[in-house]
Image (cartoon, rainbow, N blue to C red):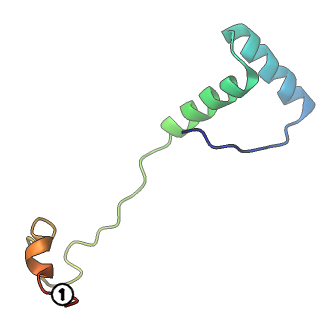
C-alpha cells in the first residue's frame, strides 16, 4: 500500500529527477520511490534490544503464552 507524502525540492534536484525519470522511462514519482527504496535497503539493520536475562520467568513463555495466561483476567 502506498502512502502519500509531500516534499519541497530545489529546482536543480527537480531537473535531475526529471532526467532520471526520462532515462528510466518512469514518472518522477516512481523514480523517487525507487531511489528512496534503494536508500532504505542500504541502511544497516536496526539494533535489537538485548532483553534476554533482564528478568526472571519461565524460559518457554513465548512458546506457551496460552498456558501461562490461562485464567488471567477472569
From the viewer's perspective, tell me whether residue 63 is left or right of residue 25. left
Residue 24 percent coordinates (x, y): 67, 11
Q: In this view, does 36 lie above or below 56?
A: above
Provide the residue designation for mark 1. Answer: 72
Q: Residues within 10 Å of mark 1 (few under 14, many from 20)?
A: few
From the viewer's perspective, tell me whether residue 66 is left or right of residue 44. left
Badge 1 element: loop
Residue 5 percent coordinates (x, y): 72, 45
In which quadrant of the rendered image does the C terminus lie?
Answer: bottom left
Query: Residue drawn at (85%, 37%), measured in percent from left and top?
Result: 9
Q: Which of 52 and 34 is in front in this view?
A: 34
- Quarter of the image for residue 38 reads top right
Residue 64 visible? The answer is yes
Query: Residue drawn at (79%, 14%), measured in percent from left and top?
Result: 19
Task: Return the residue found at the far right.
Answer: 11
Residue 17 percent coordinates (x, y): 78, 23
In which quadrant of the rendered image does the N terminus lie?
Answer: top right
Residue 32 percent coordinates (x, y): 69, 29
Residue 58 visible? The answer is no
Amino acid at each position: 500500500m502506498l502512502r502519500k507524502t509531500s516534499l519541497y525540492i530545489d529546482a536543480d534536484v527537480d531537473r535531475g529527477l526529471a532526467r532520471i525519470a526520462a532515462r528510466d522511462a518512469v514518472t518522477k514519482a516512481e523514480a523517487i520511490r525507487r531511489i528512496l527504496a534503494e536508500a532504505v535497503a542500504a541502511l544497516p539493520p536496526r539494533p535489537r534490544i538485548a532483553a534476554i536475562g533482564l528478568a526472571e520467568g519461565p524460559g518457554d513463555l513465548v512458546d506457551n503464552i496460552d498456558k501461562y495466561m490461562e485464567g488471567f483476567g477472569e
